[in-house]
């Protein structure tokens, strides 16, 4: 789609039109075999997605939220345990923690990557925790055992997993990756001396295939990846009413299975994901090149140990609302991911956090703007976006000088 007047924030029509014949064939296959829940299409996708992520197992489930909830539960987190994560993420991260019976507590984000701050995590573990008589790590804030950490690979870039795993080993924590925005993202492990895919480094990882993701279903879908066969087996039971075989229920589980049609659609799209991610990286490089001289914005930062897949291209500006309105008037769609950090959401007022508890997340939430980013974004469309951003920055600079 090359519209010279408007640039959407996200185009979900074009890729589906391009793959219409392949996607329609999936639907026909399901109709002709009456394969709607489970079966070969689910198994084929699970096998292919595990291979893509470099893991032994992939378990398809009904949503990314279910994926994270089941992963947390299967990794042994108990009701009442504290699970650490960041306040700068979508609420599904903490919903999954709460729905597993655990309690979320937060660590601030790194100002450059917007992922969990390793320094903040270490400080929390050293200064805000103690050991009880049995040696359990206890949060001084809630007087509950701290058993896990959920790093969020936000915007398509992995958190610093070597350091997170080092701290997890030191303090006896389980690491569950929230990879819901990071399909195909890579991390160079300085400990292992090789590149690792998102979803392959923690005890388990959760992926969302919400339609707008780098790999999106035509509806809700998710998956858990793991190298632990015991965890994989538990998740398979949890997603299917706790049964190891039909009508024999080892535990009380959930209805969290993935529809076969969605699995077939995802399997079809998975063959294109590497190409789509490469295109996102090209677009991000071009955004960075074209916006390099603009001192009024902060562009995404990609460390040497990261190969991000740019689920979103997020910049920061001091007049976020003004920029959004300017781009809107120019026919350009934008997003805010996310305008209110979780520690300030009404849903978590019971945790009694204050804005200053996580100053980086609080500040970033007032400045971030997500620019159009999707593989079908054309050079013409990208130029329109950049020109509009530059025009706004120049106008803002002139206004600031005149006020001075």
Image (cartoon, rainbow, N blue to C red):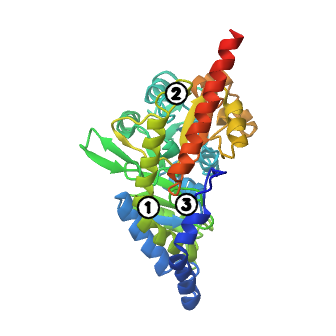
Q: Earlier in the sequence, mark 1 or mark 2?
A: 1
Q: Secondary structure at mark 2?
A: loop
Q: Farthest residue toward the left?
A: 193
Asked if residue 252 can be seen in this view, the reply is no
**x%, y% of residue 334?**
65, 44
Q: Of marks 1 and 3, which one's residue comes earlier in the chain?
A: 3
The residues bearing labels 1 and 3 have C-alpha atoms spaced at a distance of: 12 Å
Pointer 2: what residue?
294
Point out the frontmost of discs 1 and 2. 2
User: Is residue 320 at all visible to an observer of this figure?
Assistant: yes
- C-beta proximity under 8 Å, tags 1 and 2: no
Residue 340, quarter of the rendered image = top right
Residue bearing mark 1: 273
C-alpha separation, residue under disc 2 versus residue under disc 3: 34 Å
Mark 1 residue element: helix
The 10 Å Cα crowd at callout 1, few under 14, some 14 to 19, many 20 or more, is: some
**Which image quarter holds the C terminus?**
top right
Residue position for label 3: 209
In the rendering, at what x and y percent does residue 45 appear?
A: 45, 71
Q: Which quadrant of the figure has residue 327?
A: top right
Report the side of 388 relative to 153 (left or right).
right
- Dot 2 or dot 3: first in sequence order is 3
x then y, percent, for residue 216: 55, 62
Residue occupying the far top of the picture = 404
Q: Secondary structure at mark 3?
A: loop
């Amino acid at each position: 789609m090359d519209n010279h007047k408007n640039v959407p924030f996200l185009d979900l029509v074009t890729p589906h039109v391009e793959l219409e014949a392949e996607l329609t064939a999936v639907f026909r296959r399901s109709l002709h075999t009456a394969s709607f829940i489970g079966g070969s299409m689910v198994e084929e996708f699970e096998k292919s997605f595990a291979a893509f992520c470099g893991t032994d197992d992939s378990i398809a489930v009904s949503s990314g939220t279910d994926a994270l909830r089941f992963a947390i539960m299967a990794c042994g987190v108990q009701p009442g345990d504290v699970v650490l994560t960041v306040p700068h993420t979508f609420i599904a991260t903490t919903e999954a923690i709460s729905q597993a019976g655990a309690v979320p507590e937060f660590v601030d984000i790194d100002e450059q990557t917007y992922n969990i701050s390793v320094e903040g995590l270490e400080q929390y573990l050293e200064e805000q925790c103690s050991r009880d008589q049995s040696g359990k790590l206890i949060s001084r804030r809630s007087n509950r055992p701290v058993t896990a950490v959920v790093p969020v690979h936000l915007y398509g870039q992995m958190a610093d997993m070597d350091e997170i795993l080092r701290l997890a080993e030191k303090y006896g924590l389980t690491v569950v990756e929230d990879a819901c925005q990071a399909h195909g993202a890579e991390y160079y492990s300085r400990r292992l001396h090789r590149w690792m895919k998102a979803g392959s480094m923690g005890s388990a990882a959760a992926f969302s295939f919400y339609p707008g993701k780098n790999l999106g279903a035509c509806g809700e879908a998710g998956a858990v990846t793991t190298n632990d066969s015991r965890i994989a087996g538990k998740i398979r039971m949890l997603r299917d009413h706790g049964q190891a075989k039909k009508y024999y229920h080892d535990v009380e589980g959930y209805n969290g299975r993935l529809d076969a049609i969605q699995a077939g659609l995802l399997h079809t799209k998975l063959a294109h994901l590497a190409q789509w991610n490469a295109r996102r990286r090209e677009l991000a490089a071009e955004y960075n090149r074209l916006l390099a001289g603009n001192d009024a914005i902060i562009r995404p930062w990609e460390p040497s140990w990261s190969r991000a897949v740019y689920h979103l291209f997020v910049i920061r500006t001091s007049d976020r609302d003004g920029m959004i309105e300017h781009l809107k008037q120019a026919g350009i769609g934008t997003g805010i991911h996310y305008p209110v950090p979780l520690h300030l959401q009404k849903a978590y007022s019971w945790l009694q956090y204050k804005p200053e508890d996580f100053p980086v997340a609080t500040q970033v939430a007032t400045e971030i703007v997500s620019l159009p980013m999707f593989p079908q974004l054309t050079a013409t469309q990208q130029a329109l976006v950049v020109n509009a951003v530059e025009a706004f920055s120049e106008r803002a600079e002139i206004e600031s000088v005149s006020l001075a």
